[in-house]
Image (spheres, rainbow, N blue to C red):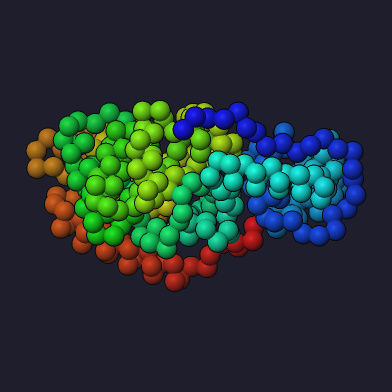
Amino acid sequence: MMASSYRFHLPSSTLHSPRSTPMSNRTELLALLQIDGLGLEQVRWLIDAFGTAAGVFQAGARALSDEGVEPNLAQEIAAVNEDLLWSLTNQLMDYEDTAGVRFVPRGDEVYPQNLMFTDEVPLFLWLRGEPVAEDSRAVAVVGSWRATPRGFSNAELIGMRLAEQGYAVVAGLGDDIDIRALKGARDGAGRGLAVLAGGIEMVPPEQEKLAERVLERGALMSGALRPADYPSRARAGTRDDIIAGLAQAVIVVEAQPEDRGVEMAMRAHNVGRPVLVVKPRHDVPDGNRQLLEMGAAPIEHIGEMFEMLEEAMELFGERERRDDLPDASR
């Protein structure tokens, strides 16, 4: 999958006419994200302040300035009108049709429901593939950047067994353990949900075949702003937040202190997901031992893993019934 140089843009215009009819939430959000000088956190803050992405554009320069937006930037936001938004809508639709992807804002009918139960609900995802209802029954399988042969074998076995029991397997597409878990899910004829550390077009060349196999039954996702954004440390953090949020439980196969396996366990804990850690009979990896000492649940055999997962799914369902979803219109 070769990366394109495509980038969305708002055409320059001097039109300042008021908007007369509502646009889609997808277009409004994407338009905000394209404005130079507005970072992702500022976009989130403005949407919280004005209720919706449309509300930000409708607010006017004075109201935006009153919320702390720099005056020139407030004028630029206020200048975006319906003609410009329709232009962006056409660009987005053309790109989605050509690339076979979809821009999915939170609240969209295909936005993953599990992600709505996180403290920082991602504003959007890029999606390739078709989501299904069973994706809510998802388990993340993660671990170190560099794993041992035993770690490879365990990750593949866990991924396969999860798939055979109807769980979707969530993982990244650039780390050893994650890749083996996704391979196992495919061998188990199940769904894999692979989350990228860069844009939706930026599949690592060495993993293109695996990505194609995942797409036969699953989906690729990205939280990067632009489809061709290169992977970075910050985007890898976004990827891992999404992985933790998509799953109802997280399994750490093999970890060393201060590496990604331990980091993923912390992210999962922070969004209220149970953390299960593989505990081999001999030579327990230092990171696994660290997580077990911190209270993570040990997995010593596959049957035990499924017992703990069923309990985790039950607890997640209770939480889902108890908690109100965040406002999907925002």
Residue at 76% of width from left, 49% of height from top? 86
Residue at 71% of width from left, 46% of height from top? 90
Q: Residue furthest left?
A: 282
- The quadrant the C terminus occupies is bottom right
Residue 277 percent across, percent down from the top left: 24, 46
Residue 324 placement, left or right of 273 = right
Residue at 81% of width from left, 60% of height from top? 21
Q: Of 24 and 139, which appears nearest the observer?
A: 24
| Whether residue 193 is situated above or below residue 7 in the rendered picture | below
Residue 328 placement, left or right of 152 = right
Q: Residue furthest front?
A: 98
Residue 94 placement, left or right of 23 = left
Residue 266 percent across, percent down from the top left: 37, 43
Q: Of 85 and 250, which appears nearest the observer?
A: 85
Residue 26 percent across, percent down from the top left: 65, 52
Which image quarter: residue 65? Answer: top right
Residue 87 placement, left or right of 5 = right
Q: Is residue 166 visible?
A: yes
Q: How many marks?
A: 0
Which image quarter: residue 257? Answer: top left
Q: Of 9 and 280, which appears nearest the observer?
A: 9
